[in-house]
Image (tube, rainbow, N blue to C red):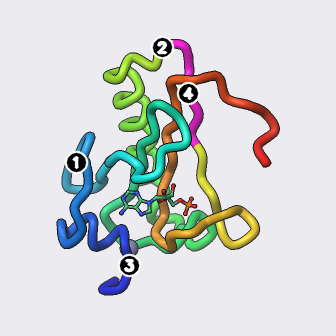
Amino acid sequence: MSDCLFCKIVSNEIPSKKVYEDDRILAFYDINPAAPVHILVIPKEHIESLAALQDEHLGLIGYLHGKIRDIARDLKLADGYRVVNNCGKEGGQEVGHLHFHLLGGRKMLWPPG
Ligand code: AMP
Ligand code: ZN
C-alpha cells in the first residue's frame, strides 16, 4: 500500500527505531510513547485491521505474538506488560495497518478509556 505509513516504515521510506525484524514482522518504538516501553509490532504484509484478518493470516498472528513474548522477555518486562490492538474507528485505530502495542515499564490502569 503506497500511502500506508507503516508500509513506508517497513520499506524504510520512513525511518523508525527498530527493535526486531525478520521476513514476516517488524517491531519498532512508538514515536509518541504512552509508557516507558512502547513498541509497535506489525506484520510486514499490509493487513488493514484485526477485523480485516483472513483465516490464512492466523498462523502469522500467532507467530507475531510469540515474538511479542520474546521481545518482552528480552526487555526484562518480568513484572508484566500489556498488549493492545485498537481496531477500527471506535476502537481508536489511527493507522490502517494492523499493529499491536506492547506497553510496559509502569503499572497499567484498568479499564482503559
Ligand atoms: P493506533 O491509534 O492504535 O492506530 O496507534 C498508532 C500508533 O502509531 C500511535 O501510538 C502513534 O504514536 C504511532 N505512530 C504514528 N506515527 C509513527 C511513526 N512514524 N513511528 C512510530 N510510531 C508512530
Ligand atoms: Zn500498510
| Disc assigned to residue 90 | none
**SS assignment for the magenta stretch, majority:** strand
Q: Position of residue 67 (x, y in %)?
A: 36, 37
In the picture of the structure, the residue carrying the numbered disc 3 is 4
Q: Residue at x 66, y 70 (%)?
A: 88
The answer to whether marks 3 and 2 mark residues whose Cβ atoms lie closer than 8 Å is no
Q: What residue type is labelled 3?
A: Cys
Which badge, 4 or 3, is on the more N-terminal residue? 3
Q: Position of residue 38 (x, y in %)?
A: 46, 40
**Side of 57 relative to 34 (left or right):** left
Q: Does the residue labelled 3 lie within 8 Å of ligand 2?
A: yes
Q: How far apart are marks 1 and 3 (CA)?
A: 19 Å
Q: How far apart are marks 2 and 1 (CA)?
A: 22 Å
Which residue occupies the foreground of this view, 31 or 92?
A: 31
Q: Which amino acid does label 2 sit on?
A: Ala
Which badge, 3 or 2, is on the more N-terminal residue? 3
Q: Is mark 4 within 8 Å of ligand 1?
A: no
Q: What residue type is labelled 1?
A: Glu
Give the structural element (helix, strand or loop) at label 2.
loop
Which region shows up in magenta? 79-83
Q: Is residue 10 magenta?
A: no
Q: Distance between the residues labelled 4 and 3?
A: 28 Å
In the picture of the structure, the residue carrying the numbered disc 2 is 78
Q: Which residue is drawn at 24% across and 47% down?
A: 18
The answer to whether marks 2 and 4 mark residues whose Cβ atoms lie closer than 8 Å is no
In the picture of the structure, the residue carrying the numbered disc 4 is 81
Disc 4: CA contacts within 10 A as few (<14), some (14-19) or many (>=20): some
Which badge, 2 or 1, is on the more N-terminal residue? 1
Q: What residue type is labelled 4?
A: Tyr
Q: Does the magenta stretch include residue 82?
A: yes
